[in-house]
Image: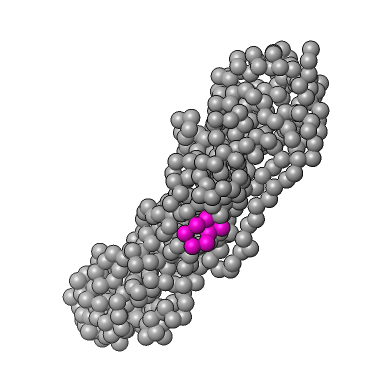
């Protein structure tokens, strides 16, 4: 698993001040569950990671009192609009914004701040620096001219352009601006918002790993299917941790193949005798993620307010009609990461906006369709089906192209092209309303659907 690791590094220009640095690092599942380390990439916006982090950094007791009174320690006003075009997630963009607009310090007082500003200006004392200081102080030319003539009566100034005839850095020194401390600070420092460096302890552990809660007890795991059975479909497990043990509760639909899959999963991983619901320890759960084709998620993680824990459910079989149906497949509402994972498995470039990824997915489906079409033709030439239009909960999968990760998608394309009169599924019938890419796109967008239960008939 991964998390965000935070650290502070000295500013290149002013080493007494530090800037935020962050990177993605590896952590264990035990770190996440037992110590509350944030599970990077496994939770969504509903966890409110951005809001919770800002809430801690902007807490009144985290502001530097002496600097706050003078306007140098104030709330971080993160703007999603300002950072919209930056790379990364919303949280990464917020961290980059903090890096660019907040200094972290150890025990900085106002007098020390002024001294650092003066030192910085002295090291870069030139005509442009002095002119910028004057421009901040004097808003009109007459007051600026009066100030300069008071310093050197023989100078002649009739307009701003005449100032370029003189080297202001030779005419004026820092002492001439000793009563303009706020101007010196704003001119010298690119950032004028400060926090104590210790504030990182409010959002990270001793190693800087992002931590916004003490521990995590509820999460989900999803089985991505087993290839040793004909029908392979995801099963969502509600996971409840007590101590170092996790109770795995599957949500089951009334399909024999799904229940068989759940039994196999329990038999392989359980520490008890549970047939469907079973118990594992954290180490086993981590192996399930690493080796067992499981994914983990935290849909109930909310750092601002607790969510109700999710529940598992199971449906009872209502009938025994032996029918066949097409299962779920990826649609336009799928996440970009899910689409990229499929493209990656087929060595297709994963760059581009979501619309471009969906177009690549449609082209990939067309390619896989052509590869699997001979096998599908052979299967449906020997096995004949009619569509009853009604979806039945006990429907089984078609036992064909089981080695294909896009099986249900390809079957949806095939049945759409080879269904005659919306009823008879025939390999020798071809509906050419759509070409393959257009058909895949229509299925992805939901413009065409492949529904109903198919009855096997003898001919």
The scheme the figure's colours follow is: one colour
**330 over 129 or under it: above or below:** above
Which secondary structure class fits the magenta region best?
A: strand
The percent position of residue 106, horizontal first and vertical second, equals: 29, 77
Regarding residue 390, the answer to whether it shows in the image is yes
**256 over 67 or under it: above or below:** above
**29 over 441 or under it: above or below:** below
Instruction: Please name whichever residue, 172 or 355, is drawn nearer the observer in this view of the structure.
Output: 355
Number of numbered discs on residues: 0
- Start-end of magenta stretch: 240-246
Q: Residue at x 34, y 61 (%)?
A: 21
The percent position of residue 277, horizontal first and vertical second, equals: 60, 49
Q: Residue at x 25, y 69 (%)?
A: 14
Q: Residue at x 66, y 17 (%)?
A: 379
Instruction: Please name whichever residue, 69 or 117, is drawn nearer the observer in this view of the structure.
Output: 69
Regarding residue 406, the answer to whether it shows in the image is no
**10 over 262 or under it: above or below:** below
Instruction: Please name whichever residue, 49 or 136, is drawn nearer the observer in this view of the structure.
Output: 49
The percent position of residue 3, horizontal first and vertical second, equals: 42, 56
Please tell me in which quadrant of the rendered image residue 316 appears. top right
Q: Look at the image and say whether residue 348 sits in the magenta stretch.
A: no
Residue pushed farthest left? 170
Q: Residue at x 55, y 23 (%)?
A: 367
On the rendered structure, is 31 left or right of 254? left
Please tell me in which quadrant of the rendered image residue 118 appears. bottom left
């Amino acid at each position: 698993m991964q998390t965000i690791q935070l650290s502070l590094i000295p500013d290149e220009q002013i080493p007494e001040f530090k800037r935020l640095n962050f990177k993605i690092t590896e952590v264990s599942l035990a770190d996440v569950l037992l110590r509350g380390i944030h599970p990077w990439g496994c939770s969504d916006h509903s966890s409110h990671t951005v809001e919770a982090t800002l809430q801690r950094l902007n807490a009144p007791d985290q502001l530097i009192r002496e600097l706050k009174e003078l306007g140098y320690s104030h709330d971080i006003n993160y703007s999603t609009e300002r950072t919209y075009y930056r790379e990364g997630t919303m949280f990464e963009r917020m961290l980059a914004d903090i890096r660019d607009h907040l200094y972290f310090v150890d025990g900085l007082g106002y007098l020390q701040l002024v001294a650092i500003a003066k030192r910085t200006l002295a090291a870069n004392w030139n005509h442009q620096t002095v002119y910028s200081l004057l421009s901040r102080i004097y808003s009109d030319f007459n007051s600026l001219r009066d100030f300069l003539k008071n310093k050197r009566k023989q100078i002649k100034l009739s307009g701003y352009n005449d100032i370029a005839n003189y080297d202001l850095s030779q005419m004026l020194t820092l002492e001439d601006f000793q009563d303009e401390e706020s101007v010196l600070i704003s001119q010298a420092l690119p950032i004028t918002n400060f926090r104590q460096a210790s504030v990182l302890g409010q959002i990270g552990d001793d190693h800087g790993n992002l931590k916004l809660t003490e521990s995590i007890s509820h999460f989900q795991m999803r089985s991505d299917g087993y290839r040793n059975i004909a029908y392979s479909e995801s099963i969502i497990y509600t996971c409840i941790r007590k101590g170092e043990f996790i109770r795995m509760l599957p949500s089951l639909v009334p399909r024999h193949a799904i229940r068989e899959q759940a039994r196999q999963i329990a038999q392989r991983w359980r520490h008890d005798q549970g047939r469907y619901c079973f118990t594992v320890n954290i180490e086993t759960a981590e192996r399930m993620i690493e080796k067992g084709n499981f994914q983990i998620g935290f849909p109930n993680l909310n750092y601002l307010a607790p969510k109700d824990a999710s529940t598992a459910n199971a449906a009872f079989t209502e009938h025994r009609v032996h029918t066949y149906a097409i299962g779920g497949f990826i649609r336009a509402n799928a996440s970009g990461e899910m689409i990229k994972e499929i493209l990656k498995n087929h060595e297709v470039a994963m760059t581009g906006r979501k619309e471009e990824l969906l177009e690549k997915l449609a082209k990939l489906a067309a390619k896989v369709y052509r590869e699997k079409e001979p096998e599908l033709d052979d299967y449906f030439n020997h096995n004949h089906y009619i569509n009853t239009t009604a979806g039945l909960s006990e429907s089984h999968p078609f036992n064909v192209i089981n080695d294909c990760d896009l099986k249900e998608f390809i079957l949806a394309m095939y049945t759409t092209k080879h269904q005659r009169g919306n009823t008879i599924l025939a390999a020798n019938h071809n509906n050419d309303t759509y070409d393959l890419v257009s058909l895949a796109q229509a299925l992805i967008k939901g413009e065409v659907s492949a529904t109903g239960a198919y009855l096997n008939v003898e001919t």
